[in-house]
Image (cartoon, rainbow, N blue to C red):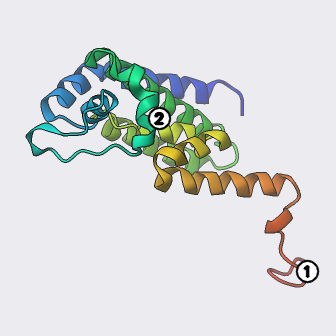
Amino acid sequence: MRDGVAEFFALALILYAMTAYPAVLEHTQQHGYDAPIYHRAAQGDLDQPGGIPGWVYSDRLLPAMAWWGAMPYPLALLLLHAANAAGLGLLAARVLRHRDHQPRLSWIAFAGVGWLATDALAGGNITPLLAGLCSTPAGAVVACCVKPWLGLPFALLHAVIIAGRCGGGLLRQPAGRGVASG
């Protein structure tokens, strides 16, 4: 359905998320996670001060993040926060575009995306960006490189959808099996 409703709500979600940036900056500087951990790791510092348990999803990605680590932390967080907001907006728009077929489910899923906006954005976690990427097949593969537990189910879902559009292929039921049609 292309009546602009999905895009309106996606944009509203992005704007809402961006208004939270000052609070997220303060929160992450005060508590030291998640974005500060990524930022220090991108600078080559894998030791976390004060015994804060830290993690980087894949140290192989750190060379690609060096440009981000070279920025002052507030600017680096602003870029991450904007990318996360855009990821949530993309996911929200994809969910709401299906509301003509599954209206209740689409709005419930949109509410879940909104909850993700309030929860996952607070620590500067990369999950909202990855979740948005997962709404496309190529993005799901990229997400698998960072967080396999997040990207893999979406990559498999896209494979099933694509296979279904291509006539089933390996997913087709053998003749004589499954639910009888009549």
Q: Is residue 45 visible?
A: yes
- Residue 137: give x, y in percent of width and height: 67, 44
In this rendering, the answer to whether 128 lies above or below 53 is above
Q: Residue at x 39, y 46 (%)?
A: 57
Q: Quadrant of the C terminus?
A: bottom right
Residue 170 versus residue 108: which sits nearer the camera? 170
Residue drawn at 49 percent across, 53 percent down: 148
Nearer to us of marks 2 and 1 is 2
Q: Are marks 2 and 1 in contact (CB under 8 Å)?
A: no
- Which one is earlier in the sequence, the residue at label 2 or at label 1? 2
* Amino acid carrying mark 1 in the image: Ala
In this orientation, does residue 16 appear?
Answer: no
Instruction: Using residue 169 as the reference point, say whether residue 101 is left or right of it.
Output: left
Residue 62 position by quadrant: top left
- In the rendered image, residue 177, in percent from the top left (x then y), is placed at 84, 83
Residues at marks 2 and 1, CA–CA distance in whole angstroms? 42 Å
On the rendered structure, is 180 left or right of 58? right
Mark 1, Cα crowd under 10 Å, few <14 / some 14-19 / many 20+, is few
Three-letter residue code for mark 2: Leu
Label placed on residue 175? 1
Tag 1, which secondary structure?
loop
The reply, left or right, for residue 96 in relation to residue 27 is right
Q: Quadrant of the N terminus?
A: top right
Residue annotated with mark 2: 129
- SS of the residue under disc 2: helix
Q: Position of residue 173 (x, y in %)?
A: 83, 74
Q: Residue furthest left?
A: 50
Residue plotted at (8% across, 40% down): 50
